[in-house]
Image: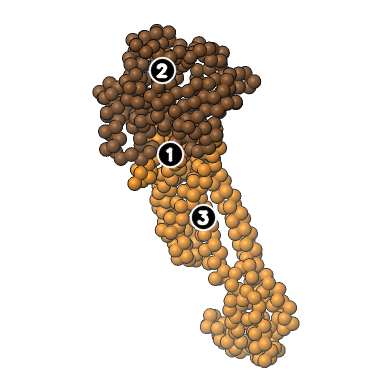
Chain colours: A orange, B brown
């Protein structure tokens, strides 16, 4: 019971300090909001770029043609070889006859021309779907080594640009997140340092009247948690609103991107983890700052 | 209760105290007297365990304070200290200042209220409970400081020049309050260089100069 009363007293002390710190408290909350919001937005775009990648991956297909004289047995063998290449999600074979039928369906106005041909000009064709853009190079390399393959196509430029964009964006995102975590840690550390400095007389008196060190330290931790929770809640609310509006806008600009996975990732758990991470960082920073500055008072 | 045995204290090769010995029993009242820089505050800081002696040993309740490796904050709840500059929490009311030592120990709100109001009445500040220190006079602030020091019911109350910032009339009132607390059984050690106070109150005196004990005078028994 005594410990509970002491803990409640520490919470009261923290709340009084938060209110009395006034401007410093507002600055701290503002920095927490800006940091979390920026980290959240970067995370959003990182995930969105992943969805863009998946959307494009769904559209990418490698098509390759075999020599017209390739027999059915060999075609079956080639199909099995392709299925066994790592990174291949699915393989579809289109015979020259089926390809011609589809061509006629697509261009009915030229039906008579196609039917008048002595010989079907279309080669046996395979359509290969990779499981990721990163598998394309390996698949095309192996396909090109099959002697019967006469030619193959895929959107090389698009894939290369996509891979470059994703890598660049991921790299920049990591840098941005690191910078904002750094800013957050710096301001939180400065805030605690200034708080300790502002309260150095009170801390000195506390020490002289027999206050246990935990009673001096814990209010700083509790303050950090409270400020993180306030900043975290406000930024979570802002992030939620921003995610919803930006997603609507992006759905118009990039309709081929599926957002289902994204909304699954940015659910309540995301906000809980985000806030818990902020509280964790705040506790770690508080621990090191308090250890450094209170060592002189409570060696 | 408290015993100094050949205690010396050096600050950067400068001897602040030299081979001081004395003994106090429970309920004693001791004036430590001497000019500024004599070493009075050093003796009090040693008792309060803010500093450690360079040589010698201090005993409190038959245990060595010098070898004490327990929690200092627990010790300071038994040895309370009062300062010339009061050392009050500026942003706490009189009531909050006095209740603080009890709150950090987890006393119940009712028990805190009873104790604090009782002590404030004793020091004559029951009407000022909700005031902040800056609105009080020097004498009132020192009485808040005394109230905070005794609310814990300490074994020893040490006061470092508690009347140093006060006029003579207020000073006598403060010492009268110490006498009253002492009559309730609390051991009191008070440092002063105020000759009027020493003459008026027939109490034991430890006179020190340049860190050395010049003499020790016991009260007249009439």
Name the residue that disc number 2 marks.
Answer: B162
For label 3, the crowd category at 10 Å Cα-Cα, with few meaning under 14, some 14 to 19 and many 20 or more, is some
Q: Are marks 2 and 3 on the same chain?
A: no
The answer for which chain carries disc 2 is B
Q: Is residue A236 visible?
A: yes
> In the image as oriented, which residue stretches furthest toward the front?
B222
Residue A273 drawn above or below residue A220: below
Task: Say which quarter of the image contains residue B147.
Answer: top left
For label 2, the crowd category at 10 Å Cα-Cα, with few meaning under 14, some 14 to 19 and many 20 or more, is many
Give me the residue at 49% from left, 33% from top. Answer: B63
Secondary structure at badge 3 equals: helix
Question: If you read the primary sequence from the N terminus, does the residue marked by circle 1 or circle 3 appear first?
Answer: 3
Tell me where residue A105 appears, x and y as whole percent: 52, 83
Tell me where residue B196 appears, x and y as whole percent: 40, 7
The answer for which chain carries disc 3 is A
Name the residue that disc number 3 marks.
Answer: A43
Give me the residue at 45% from left, 51% from top. Answer: A275
> Which callout, 2 or 3, points to the residue nearer the camera?
2
Q: Is residue B84 visible?
A: no
Residue A71 drawn above or below residue A253: below
């Amino acid at each position: 019971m005594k410990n509970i009363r002491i803990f409640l007293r520490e919470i009261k002390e923290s709340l009084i300090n938060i209110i009395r710190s006034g401007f410093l408290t507002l600055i701290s909350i503002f920095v927490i909001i800006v940091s979390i919001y920026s980290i959240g937005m970067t995370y959003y775009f990182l995930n969105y770029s992943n969805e863009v990648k998946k959307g494009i991956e769904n559209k990418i297909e490698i098509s390759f043609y075999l020599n017209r004289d390739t027999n059915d047995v060999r075609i079956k063998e080639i199909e099995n070889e392709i299925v066994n290449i790592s990174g291949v999600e699915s393989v579809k074979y289109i015979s020259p006859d089926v390809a011609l039928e589809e061509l006629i369906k697509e261009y009915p106005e030229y039906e008579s021309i196609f039917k008048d041909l002595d010989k079907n000009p279309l080669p046996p064709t395979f359509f290969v779907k990779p499981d990721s853009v990163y598998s394309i190079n390996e698949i095309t390399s192996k396909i090109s080594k099959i002697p019967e393959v006469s030619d193959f196509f895929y959107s090389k430029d698009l894939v290369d640009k996509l891979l470059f964009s994703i890598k660049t964006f991921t790299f920049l995102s990591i840098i941005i997140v690191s910078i904002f975590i750094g800013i957050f840690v710096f301001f939180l550390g400065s805030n605690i340092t200034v708080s300790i400095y502002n309260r150095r007389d009170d801390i000195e008196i506390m020490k002289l009247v027999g206050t246990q060190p935990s009673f001096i330290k814990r209010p700083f931790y509790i303050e950090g948690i409270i400020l993180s929770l306030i900043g975290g809640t406000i930024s979570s609310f802002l992030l939620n609103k921003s995610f919803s509006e930006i997603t609507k806008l992006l759905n118009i600009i990039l309709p081929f991107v599926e957002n289902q996975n994204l909304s699954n990732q940015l659910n309540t758990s995301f906000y809980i983890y985000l806030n818990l991470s902020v509280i964790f960082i705040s506790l770690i920073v508080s621990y090191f700052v308090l250890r450094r500055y209170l060592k002189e008072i409570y060696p | 209760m408290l015993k100094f045995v050949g205690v010396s204290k050096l600050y950067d090769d400068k001897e602040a105290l030299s081979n001081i010995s004395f003994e106090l029993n429970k309920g004693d009242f001791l004036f430590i007297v001497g000019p500024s820089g004599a070493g009075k505050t050093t003796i009090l800081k040693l008792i309060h365990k803010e500093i450690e002696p360079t040589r010698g040993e201090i005993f409190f309740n038959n245990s060595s304070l010098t070898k004490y490796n327990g929690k200092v904050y627990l010790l300071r709840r038994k040895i309370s200290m009062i300062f010339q500059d009061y050392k009050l929490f500026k942003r706490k009311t009189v009531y909050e200042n006095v209740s603080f030592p009890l709150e950090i120990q987890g006393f119940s709100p009712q028990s805190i209220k009873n104790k604090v109001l009782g002590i404030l009445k004793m020091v004559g500040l029951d009407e000022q409970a909700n005031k902040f220190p800056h609105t009080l006079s020097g004498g009132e602030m020192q009485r808040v400081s005394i109230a905070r020091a005794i609310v814990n019911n300490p074994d020893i109350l040490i006061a470092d020049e508690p009347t140093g910032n006060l006029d003579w009339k207020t000073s006598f009132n403060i010492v009268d309050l110490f006498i009253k607390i002492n009559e309730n059984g609390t051991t009191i050690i008070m440092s002063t260089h105020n000759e009027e106070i020493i003459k008026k109150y027939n109490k034991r005196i430890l006179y020190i100069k340049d860190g050395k004990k010049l003499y020790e005078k016991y009260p007249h028994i009439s």
